[in-house]
């Protein structure tokens, strides 16, 4: 399964001096990177690929990391649940790229 998720901290120490939330988001991305699961971070979402329980555990730990810096956290999550398929984080993009070549 692939999960795309976005965490939005609000209030407290989560807001950087420039009004951004980079420090709190970096804490979440660190959790994802340390998980060892295939992942990708973009400007709006972080993608994680793996089995249900391991992916959801990473999302929870990332959310907890942001919650440690903010009194409120918004979570947007989208999942592609396709049993029996792996390496789809890269595979989906590769199939589209082949069609565009």
Image: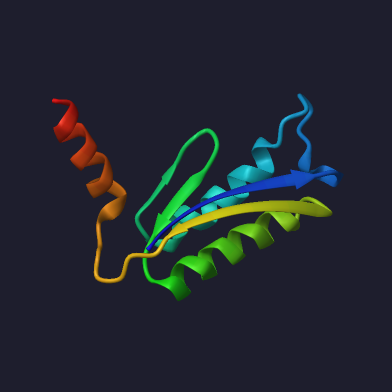
Residues 77 and 28: in front is 77
Q: Quadrant of the C terminus?
A: top left
* Residue at figure coordinates x 23%, y 48% from the top left: 91
Q: Horizontal and vertical percent for residue 18? A: 76, 24
39 left or right of 85 in image: right
Q: Quadrant of the N terminus?
A: bottom left
Please state the total of marks drawn on the protein image.
0
- Farthest residue to the bottom: give it: 53
Query: Is 25 in front, or is 55?
Result: 55
The x and y percentages for residue 97 are 20, 33
Q: Residue at x 23, y 36 (%)?
A: 96
Name which residue lies at 86% across and 46% down.
12
Tell me if 74 is positioned left or right of 29 in this view.
Answer: right
Q: Is 17 on the left or on the right of 27, as rendered?
A: right
Residue 17 x %, y %: 79, 28
40 to 101, vertically: above or below: below
* Picture layout, residue 82 above or below residue 67: below
- Please state which of residues 45 and 29 is positioned toward the viewer in this rendering: 45
Display colour scheme: rainbow
- In the rendered image of this protein, does residue 59 appear above or below residue 89? below
Residue at x 85%, y 43% (from the top left corner)? 11
| Residue 80 picture location, percent across and down | 40, 58
Q: Is residue 39 above or below residue 97?
A: below
């Amino acid at each position: 399964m692939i999960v795309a998720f976005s965490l939005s901290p609000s209030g407290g120490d989560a807001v950087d001096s420039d009004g951004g939330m980079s420090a709190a988001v970096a804490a979440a991305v660190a959790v994802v990177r340390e998980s060892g699961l295939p992942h990708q971070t973009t400007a709006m979402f972080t993608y994680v690929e793996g089995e249900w329980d391991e992916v959801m555990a990473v999302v929870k730990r990332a959310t907890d990391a942001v919650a440690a810096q903010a009194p409120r956290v918004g979570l947007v999550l989208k999942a592609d649940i396709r049993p029996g398929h792996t390496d789809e984080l890269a595979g989906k993009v590769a199939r589209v790229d082949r069609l565009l070549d």
